Amino acid sequence: MAYDKFTVLKSTAVPLPAENVDTDQIIPARFLKATEREGFGDNLFRDWRYDVEGNSKKDFVLNDPTYSGKILVAGKNFGSGSSREHAVWAIYDYGFRCVVSSFFADIFKNNCLNIGVLPVTVSADFAEKLFEAIEQNPNVEIEVNLPEQKITLLSTGDSESFDINEYKKDNMQNGFDDIDYLLNMSDEIDAFVASK
């Protein structure tokens, strides 16, 4: 399944400074029965967003109209816990295209890259700058430039470079998952098979 192409994203951001957020908090296990990748966004951070009666918790950031955007700025060690892809499906389905943190769990980070959400690892100091800027002005914009592998706080010009695997970078820029990548090479594959 192809995903949105990612080149340069300029957006406001939603701050979630909590550390050690695991995949069960991102998408509780009781919502993993679905086989389609749609509808998971409704249950993103379900137990943090809603009470047992299904009412919105006003003190949770996703329920606060002050904050919006396609970038989630998260605390350290985001995506720990189980390896469920559903956590990233929920983030993508909700509308986030990038998650920024000073540290990601490895499996979660790889799931992001496979599903079309760009995980941007920054220093703890830069993450703190982002949190402070968003708190001071929820309309502040962040630019994530994938071709240049650079994230910039546009209000100050502060920026950092980030690392990404070249194969995954190319796939993100083309909107490919691993299957799309192989299908895109079908002519080359056919030519190779014919030459044998």
Image (cartoon, rainbow, N blue to C red):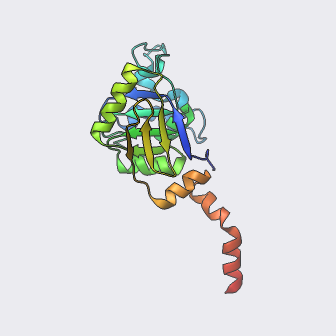
In the picture, the quarter occupied by the C terminus is: bottom right
Seen at 57% across and 52% down, the residue is 173
Horizontal and vertical percent for residue 72? 44, 33
Which of 66/37 is in front? Answer: 66
Instruction: Mark yes or no: residue 2 visible.
Output: yes
Seen at 61% across and 36% down, the residue is 38
Give the camera-side residue of 144 and 77: 144
Residue at x 33%, y 36% (from the top left corner): 127
User: Residue 3, position in %: x, y?
Assistant: 61, 46
Left or right side of 140 for 79:
left
**Residue extending farthest left:** 125
The image quarter in which residue 77 lies: top left
Q: How many marks?
A: 0
From the viewer's perspective, tell me whether residue 124 is left or right of residue 31.
left
Left or right? Give the position of 117 relative to 133.
Answer: right
Residue 85 seen by the camera: no
Q: Residue at x 56, y 58 (%)?
A: 178
